[in-house]
Amino acid sequence: MSVARPKLGIIAGAGELPHLLARLALGKGTPVHLLLIDGLADPAPHAIPSSVMPLGALGKAFRTLKNTHCREVVFAGQFTRPAETRRLRPDLTALWFLITQRRQLRAGDDAIHRAVEDAFRRRGFEVVSPLAIAPELAAPAGTLTLRLPDHHQSEQFASAMRAAKSHGGTDIGQAIVIRDGEVLAREGRDGTDAMLRRLNLEAKGGMLVKAMKPAQLRVIDPPAIGVHTVEAAAAAGLQGILIEAGTTLIVDRKAVQTAADRLGLFVAAIPSEGE
């Protein structure tokens, strides 16, 4: 018999994951409240309780979570740094956070994530990973698609994963594109899809590799792929996608498999060395 989880606040960025997590949590008997980031998150279905808040309304987030009796918090979806500071619209709580955490905010993503997690924990909320809510979304080891990697590609998997981990050690991104042992592209702070869009077929025949950063806080921003990732990889002329088993989240595995099979890509997952 599973133990019921406390009420979950889902801080929703862009993409399908926030609504998917809400449905999965509700299906397991966990009550939820969606906090939709204005300008990023899609509107919530009427059946799911939700609130809309501007990016930077940290005080409102704390109050809403408290007033709706949420005890756990999960960050789901894509969150991008605003190109213009005026779009941030910080409230007084967020301003205090920005002032007191200015050193961390100048550092890499992981320092920012740790500062955010600490701020929520100090307010009495536990930040949890999306995979703690829905472990069934974790990539299983093996090949997920009809197309299989050939022998040459399979032989490169371990070194390709090490290269992705090496890039992750810079705390800039989780993904690379590699071909015949040469890294052709590295994910920047604008994300995996943006990296793939910049390729313009110069990486044709390569593969996308995505993995958890070696030292990252695991409860925020685990590596994830979805249908958009598959489509962007195909548009860049890649032959496949290699992800880290167990730590990478697949948004709608069936749809990802269908898209990859239709576009002729393989999707494979291997465990990280030492795990």
Image (spheres, grey):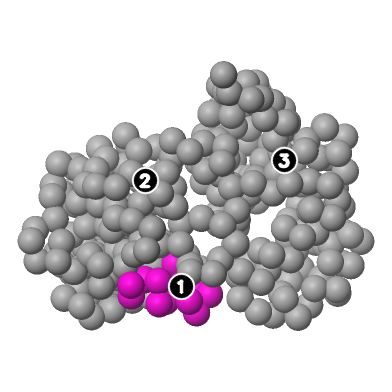
Is 173 in the magenta? yes
- Within 10 angstroms of label 1, few (less than 14), some, or many (20 or more) residues? many
Mark sitting earlier along the chain (2/3): 3
- Position in image of residue 168 (x %, y %): 46, 72
Residue at the extreme right: 92
Label 1, secondary structure: give it: helix
Give the side of residue 122 with respect to residue 40, left or right. Answer: right
Which image quadrant is residue 202 in?
Answer: bottom left
Q: Which residues are magenta?
A: 162-174
* Residue beneath disc 2: 139
Q: Position of residue 255 (x, y in %)?
A: 32, 37
Question: Which three-letter amino acid code belongs to the residue tagged 2?
Answer: Ala
User: Residue 33's quadrant in the figure?
Assistant: top right
- Residue 144 picture quarter: top left
- Report if residue 176 lies within the magenta region: no
Q: Which mark is residue 72?
A: 3
Q: Residue furthest front?
A: 274
In the image, is 218 to the left or to the right of 186?
Answer: right
